[in-house]
Amino acid sequence: MSKQINVALIGNPNTGKTSVFNALTGLNQKVGNYPGITVEKKEGICKLSRGVKAHIIDLPGTYSLNASSLDENVVIELLLNKNDKDFPDVAVVVSDVENLKRNLLLFTQIKDLEIPSILVINMADRMRYKGISLDIPYLEKQLNTKIALVSTRKNYGIDELKELISNYRELSTVPCMNASEIDKDYFDGLRRAFPDQLLYKLWLVITQDVNFGKTDRNEIDPVADFKTKSKSELKRLQQKETIKRYQFINETLKKGQIIDLSTAKDLRIKLDRILTHKVWGYVIFFFILLTIFQAIYDWSSVPMDFIDSTFASLSEWTKNALPEGTFTNLLAEGIIPGLGGIVIFIPQIAFLFLFISILEETGYMSRVVFLMDRGMRRFGLSGKSVVPLISGTACAIPAIMATRNIESWKERLITILVTPFTTCSARLPVYLIIISLVIPDKRFFGLGYQAMTLMLLYLIGFGAALGSAMILNKILKIRSKTFFVVEMPNYKLPLLKNVALTVVEKTKAFVFGAGKIILAISIILWFLASYGPGDDFNNAEEIVATEFANQNLSEDEIEQHVASQKLEHSFLGITGHAIEPAIRPLGYDWKIGIALVSSFAAREVFVGTLATIYSVGSDDEETIKNRMAGEVNPILGGPLFNFASGISLLLFYAFAMQCMSTLAIVQRETNSWKWPILQLVIMSTFAYIIALIAFQVLK
Amino acid sequence: MQATVAHLKKGQRGIITDVSSIYIPLKLLEMGCLPGNFVELVQVAYFSDPMYLNINGTHLAIRKETALHILIDIL
């Protein structure tokens, strides 16, 4: 353990910090949460020379040590708490060669904390292209540090960085400037009052608005001989501090950095002329979205069909290969179809995250924020709400966490409340299977009806989100500062490694996170479907034998009748029948009812539940889809999944709040039960009413 | 009348003379929005809002209401 070096990766957003992290750790990384909060914690192990290992934490991106959000707060909490087990032996500050001036602000602050620091100047391959030359020895001397010129794209500098990390003991801990000059009297007083504390650390604790969990602010307040300052005075001092730091940085860069603008090429200007254009910007954005949805639909259908049929045969094979008994049945009818219900999502989720991460990596997402801000404000949202709303098409949970960079609390709250309307990937399998059952597989000018229906459902989701945002904007009486700033990073080609890691990471998180729930529910459902109370269930064979005594049925047919008799009178069947009156007006039978109820834990359970229900007692190797197509409406006759009931189901799933994890995250992010409960009640009631109208009109 | 960033036309440049700290959050200052630095209007959305700026080499977008509080000398 003693040989492990704790390294913290710190840097502004958009400096390629995560690329450096990926280059250092490769696949030796894991993503978790900081205890008690939902901020993502990325850590990994990097092998250095001579058998030494470095434990690397990729801290959330921040522009300075003055935290304005939960994510940024994590950075300060770690850097101020020497007792934290992750407290860095060395801080690696990642900067972007094109934005060195701004990036150095954070660096000078970290130097003031007297933590050994290395400055990484990333994207160094762009220096020549941008006409930038650097005097590294001069900069190292001025900044009291060691510099590593790194390009994760061209793959150099990482070994040098590793070398610097191994030799971290040689790094200077002397600050590179003296920020306390901005108010000498004040800081002298502070120093006298707390002689054994680091001055800059005290200053940070005093000026932060955010709550510090571990760092105790109280130890500063009670000292009498130290004159405290008012909030506005402190703010003015912070402003002076920022100016002071920039003065130092400007001085340093004047000699250390030469930018020859005549050789600089700027792709940004040319691209932005089109991509942020008042007309073309929107047209292009619309076509990008259209392409994404068409691609997800077309590309994932093949692997999905394959997964579906594979699990059907696996289930069949298990039944035949293993000795008959409860365990075999549980495996073949409960667990395997349940697992199939998870695995089947992988293709679409992977594609969705692929596109979203490409949009983020290229820098295009910021342009979308810019384009949409004005329009979104009309709905009480911010341009930054677009990112959650788009990520919501993958999963509402990360999407709601992505609202943290929205500055205005009202805009943020509305975004949190409406994001669950966007079509998340858990709705996708429900949509896909129902669409394939009730919408004809025909094409209209190359666009498939089925794909268009899917696109329409996505639009309905966005429409519901915007509509409800507009209403919330009118109702909610929250006064909060509307403030908005978004960085427009340079365009970059996405790094394959970053994109691939994001896709793998997010898909894994989804499969294992949601998978547990789905599997558990599948098993519970199987038990409920396989056991029942009373004679109707336990004497099913005799009842069927008497009922069909003179019809001369084959053995197979008798078995089927027994199975359906059993299912109908099982615990599950009884529950389903109990709620049937409530859902019959929507065109559903008791089996769909059960799937609906279990979906309130998580939507994605729907297909798995139907798979479990329909596979209980049936022997033939059939896909879920074929089984659903074969279901007959017990009252109206004809297929159970017809156009009217199909559309009604689609709309119910579009609007209903059926995800416990989302409710939990809303509770955490809003710190109140009021909002998630309102979400659950209002969204689900609305869903019921719309589905009811749809079925009654279409039937 | 004192010119502000909101008065800039597309492609025009100015030098920041003052920022009123009541309306301008620290974060924007930290991104380089400080007296003495240059600002250029790169692109505008509908009704010039938000405004896509180049401040001291940092490219960012802010709303017009914020831009009104950044005083400049137009170059």
Image (spheres, coloured by chain):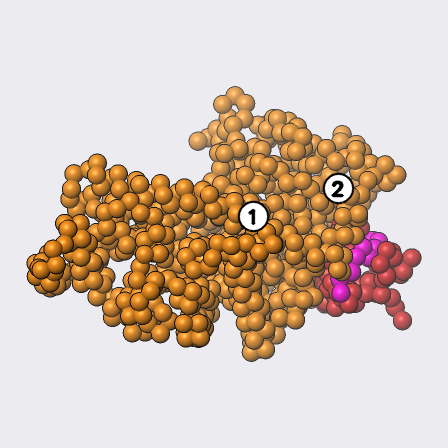
Chain colours: A orange, B red
> At which x and y percent is residue A602?
38, 58
> At which x and y percent is residue A367?
69, 54
State the mark number for residue A474: none
- For residue B45: magenta? yes
State the mark number for residue A295: 1
Based on the displayed image, in which of its 4 quarters is residue A262 positioned? Answer: top right
> At which x and y percent is residue A649?
41, 65
Question: Which label lies toward us, 2 or 1?
Answer: 1
The magenta stretch is B33-46
Residue at image x 61%, y 45%?
A: A358
Which of A697 and A99 lies nearest the eye of the viewer?
Answer: A697
Based on the displayed image, in which of its 4 quarters is residue A210 positioned? Answer: bottom right
**Camera sees residue A363:** yes
- For residue A485: magenta? no
Which of B31 and B64 lies nearest the eye of the viewer?
Answer: B64
Q: Residues within 10 Å of mark 1 (few under 14, many from 20)?
A: some
> At which x and y percent is residue A50?
52, 21
Reply above or below: A44 against A463.
above
Residue under numbered circle 2: A98
Residue at image x 76%, y 30%?
A: A137
Which image quadrant: the C terminus of chain B? Answer: bottom right
Q: Chain of mark 1?
A: A
Reply above or below: B71 against A166.
below
Which of disc 1 and disc 2 is earlier in sequence?
2
Element type at mark 2: helix
Which of A472 and A144 lies nearest the eye of the viewer?
Answer: A472
Residue at image x 39%, y 51%?
A: A514
* Marks 2 & 1 on one chain: yes
Residue at image x 84%, y 58%?
A: B10
